[in-house]
Image (cartoon, rainbow, N blue to C red):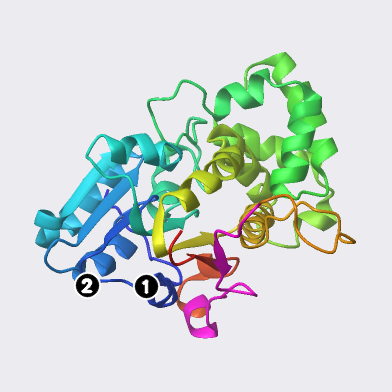
Amino acid sequence: MEFKHTSVLLRETIENLDIKPEGIYVDGTLGGGGHASEIAARLRGIGRLIGIDQDEEAIAAAKRRLEPYRERTTLIRDNYCNMRPALGRIGIEKVDGIILDLGVSSYQLDNVERGFSYKYDTALDMRMDTRQSMSAKEIINDYPESDLYRIIRDYGEEQFAKNIAKHIVTARKDKPIETTGQLCEIIKAAIPAKMRAKGGHPAKRTFQAIRIECNRELEVLKDSLDQLIDMLLPGGRICIITFHSLEDRIVKSAFRKHENPCTCPPDFPVCVCGQVPKGKVVTRKPILPSEGEMQVNTRAKSAKLRVFSKAEGK
């Protein structure tokens, strides 16, 4: 199956990355190489692109797409949370720009064997990195009802989370839940019939929640942002595209913290904490896809781009 993925907010991301032809740039969520190829095409001389992805199939697809730029491109199979040590191994400490596109790729959703989609009946998996041991199957069959409820409520923003978690636990007492089809039927049974007719597929939010938990997506993001901002050279930029309200909140909060890190009480006449801003938030409000892009690519609808610029001389 060909690795297909339409890069969301491509023009806006490339423009805000403010690419220097001889700079060093990292695409921490390489995917099929859509954003990366646009960056690589703008590099010259000692300019360099490093692409990171934990998905083996994404790395293979990006390698093909980036073939014209192979002399200035390095691909690494890893999670972007390991960016600092991964780049350290190839002699790079600081970079001019970083991008993260946190959406799951069209290829991952449409590849039946990966088990990301509720559209196909296949083995429950959802691992972005197939080397990891825990899959969606373990989450569905082993997590306590309270944890399933919390995950589906928070990560899926699903109003029937409590009932879905209850139905999952009841169903697995009879036999293990092993396929996406089984899980879909359980979710449907947990949602009132009149509500199932609204807002798309009834399993959509729960599948999203299980995927986020399986790949620790929010923890990885939260634990990585300070490190990524520290890796930027003066004037360097980080561009992050999110698709979930919790992701966007984490990014927004981290960017604001690094723009205004002062911890002094508001009534203090002068700052005494010694915390110095690391840069500025470029996007006061997130950049959203155009109407035209959303018509062409329905998966762009929930996308938001936020940008942070490292202070000069930092």
| Residue occupying image coordinates x 56% and y 25% | 137
Q: Considering only vertical position in the picture, is 269 above or below 14? A: above
Residue 228 in sight from this viewpoint? yes
Q: Is residue 141 left or right of residue 136?
A: right
Total residue callouts: 2
Residue toward you, 227 or 176: 227
Residue 204 drawn in magenta: no
Residue toward you, 8 or 270: 270
Q: Is residue 266 left or right of residue 56?
A: right
Which disc number belongs to residue 124? none
Residue toward you, 274 or 220: 274
| Residue occupying image coordinates x 25% and y 34% | 89
- Does the magenta stretch mainly form a helix, a strand or a loop? loop
Residue 273 placement (x, y as % from top left): 73, 49
Q: Is residue 128 left or right of residue 299?
A: left
| Residue occupying image coordinates x 35% and y 43% | 53
- How far is the residue under mark 1 from the one under mark 2? 10 Å
Confirm or deny contact between disc 1 and disc 2 (CB under 8 A). yes
User: Which quarter of the figure has residue 189?
Assistant: top right
Q: Is residue 9 left or right of residue 189?
A: left
Instruction: Please state which amino acid type lies under the numbered disc 1.
Output: Ile
Instruction: Please state which amino acid type lies under the numbered disc 2.
Output: Arg
Q: Residues within 10 Å of mark 1 (few under 14, many from 20)?
A: some
Q: Considering only vertical position in the picture, is 180 above or below 264? A: above
Which residues make up the magenta segment? 275-294
Residue 211 placement (x, y as % from top left): 57, 40
- SS for callout 1: helix
Which disc number belongs to residue 14? 1
Which disc number belongs to residue 42? 2
Residue 117 in sight from this viewpoint? no
Residue 15 placement (x, y as % from top left): 39, 77
Residue toward you, 207 or 251: 251
